[in-house]
Image: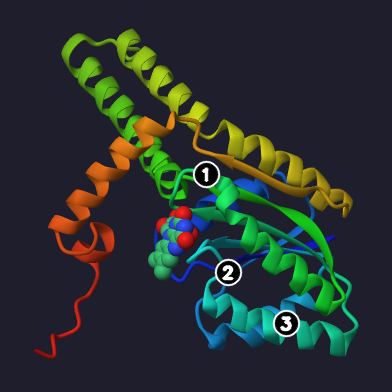
Amino acid sequence: MKTVFINCSPKKRFCASAYFLFLQRLFVVGEKVCEKLRTPADHARILEQLRDAQAVVFGLPLYVDAVPSHVLRFMEEMERFCRENGLKLSVYCVANNGFIEGKQNEPLMQNFENFCSRAGLTFGGGVGIGGGVMLNVTRILFIVDIGLLVLNTLLSEINTGNLFPRDAWISFAENAALLLYFNLGVLFYLARQGGHIRKGTAGGKKYTRILIPSFIFILFADIFFVIISVIDGGIFRGWLAKKEPSET
Ligand SMILES: Cc1cc2nc3c(=O)[nH]c(=O)nc-3n(C[C@H](O)[C@H](O)[C@H](O)COP(=O)(O)O)c2cc1C
């Protein structure tokens, strides 16, 4: 069985869609093909991959309560392609949004349901994930956590000859458990959807979010966006991206 995973985020690096598609792939067996959809130049290559596939999983962000416009263009072309070639794929999606409630992805799911019915495809279901940006940050925090553990182990070995610093391991385990907890809803529904992809059945639309209380989410989101605004448009994209010379 061949499943094509399409990362539809327009971002080049560090997108939440890549993270959630990575988790989704853990629960799917068989041949797995990963594609990236950013521009019309990607269309033909991805459509060719769909020819002999049984399932396709779209990983995408919610833009203005709907499917991003560059994905809509692709869906229009895919609709024609599937009709002309008599393809009978099952379509799944993993959508994420910036606000906390995953339920905000409902209109996007309806876009996919309508697309499937027009293209003669089967809508297998989707998982809508709220707090996507923050969940994406948890994977960075996990890597930082591992880095700190390695550093503490090295320092402990150098200073005391002890290769197993108990406190550092306890702190690592506590942090890792907390990050895992934030992701539990996502893992549960992606595992469930993975089962449906494997069996080719429909799992319906499910919504989840980062597992923290909304007032804590709002506090952190406010701090995050104030910092982003102060540094004029972004940490990773603003600081590290190549700048085009200004017209003015
Ligand atoms: C143009 C644009 C429109 C957006 N519209 C919404 C929206 O309507 N609701 C929402 O909760 N988040 C919205 N977001 C936030 C994204 O859904 C969120 O940042 C998502 O995690 C990005 O996923 P990605 O990293 O995979 O691209 C929007 C972001 C952009 C850039």
Residue under label 2: 67
- Please name the residue shown 58% across and 76% down the image: 71
Which quarter holds ligand 1?
bottom left
Vertical position of residue 77 compared to residue 189: above or below: below
* Sequence order check, earlier mark of 1 and 2: 2
State the CA–CA distance, disc 3 to disc 2: 15 Å
Q: Secondary structure at mark 1?
A: loop
Label 3 or label 2, whichever lies nearer to me, is 2
Q: Residue 74's quadrant in the figure?
A: bottom right
Q: Residue 168's quadrant in the figure?
A: top left
Residue under label 1: 101
Amino acid type for the residue under numbered disc 1: Glu
Some atom of ligand 1 lies within 8 Å of the CB belonging to the residue at label 1? yes
* The C terminus, quarter of image: bottom left
Amino acid type for the residue under numbered disc 2: Val
Mark 1: few/some/many CA within 10 Å (<14, 14-19, 20+): some
Vertical position of residue 59 compared to residue 79: above or below: above
Amino acid type for the residue under numbered disc 3: Met
> Looking at this rendering, what residue extends furthest in the left direction?
248
Some atom of ligand 1 lies within 8 Å of the CB belonging to the residue at label 2? no
